[in-house]
Amino acid sequence: MGSLKVGDKAPDFQLVDQDGTALGLKDFRGSKLILYFYPKDDTPGCTAEACNLRDNYQVLKKKGFKVLGVSSDSEAAHKKFIAKYVLPFALIPDKEKTILKAYGAWGRKKLYGKEYDGIIRTTYVIDEKGVIEKIFTKVDTKNHSQQILEEMGL
């Protein structure tokens, strides 16, 4: 995995969000999509990233972006995370790691010298036609919205 490049067609997906609503890539056609993969709800880095996207959501929306987060947490964990931080966008629980693997966001990680499989924090910006416009592998969790807007030249 991890072989996706800018200019590639984004892998299609169809899963349910925290409320059980089916969501797929096709539901975002006509809008730019910030599809972000993060390790775990309610952890420091993931909370900083989600809150930064929340705090800049209106700016992102005005620029034509929609936001969708993906982790392997449960629907219940996502609902709690959204409620606690008043997140204005959906989160997809990818328990089977279908989307995570399709986008190369699941793989070997290293922490304190130990290797393990886990979610690799990655963000994709997908254009209105479903083509990957930008890939962020070094995510600045506290300033992610600004990082996206700057890299996109906005």
Image: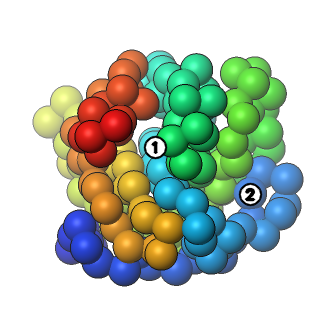
- Judging depth in this view, the residue of 70 and 34 nearest the camera is 34
Calculate the distance from the C-alpha at mark 2 to the C-alpha at mark 1.
Answer: 15 Å
Q: Quadrant of residue 7?
A: bottom left
The amino acid pointed to by label 1 is Tyr
Which residue in the protein does label 2 denote?
A: 17
* Residue pictured at 19% horizontal, 30% vertical: 112
Q: Quadrant of residue 148?
A: top left
What percent of the width, then of the height, locates residue 55? 58, 20
Q: Secondary structure at mark 2?
A: loop
Q: Position of residue 115 (x, y in %)?
A: 21, 48
Q: Secondary structure at mark 1?
A: loop
Q: In the drawing, does residue 80 fall left or right of residue 33?
A: right
Is residue 45 left or right of 54 when viewed as pictured? left
Asked if residue 71 can be seen in this view, the reply is no
Residue depicted at x 37% and y 80%: 9
- Residue picked out by circle 1: 38
* Viewer-closest of 94 and 89: 89
Q: Position of residue 126 (x, y in %)?
A: 42, 62
Q: Dot 1, how many residues are within 10 Å of its Cα: few (below 14), some (14-19), or many (20+)? A: many
In this view, 127 is above or below 52: below
Q: Quadrant of the C terminus?
A: top left
Quarter of the figure with residue 76: top right
- Three-letter residue code for mark 2: Asp
On the rendered image, what quadrant is the N terminus found in? bottom left
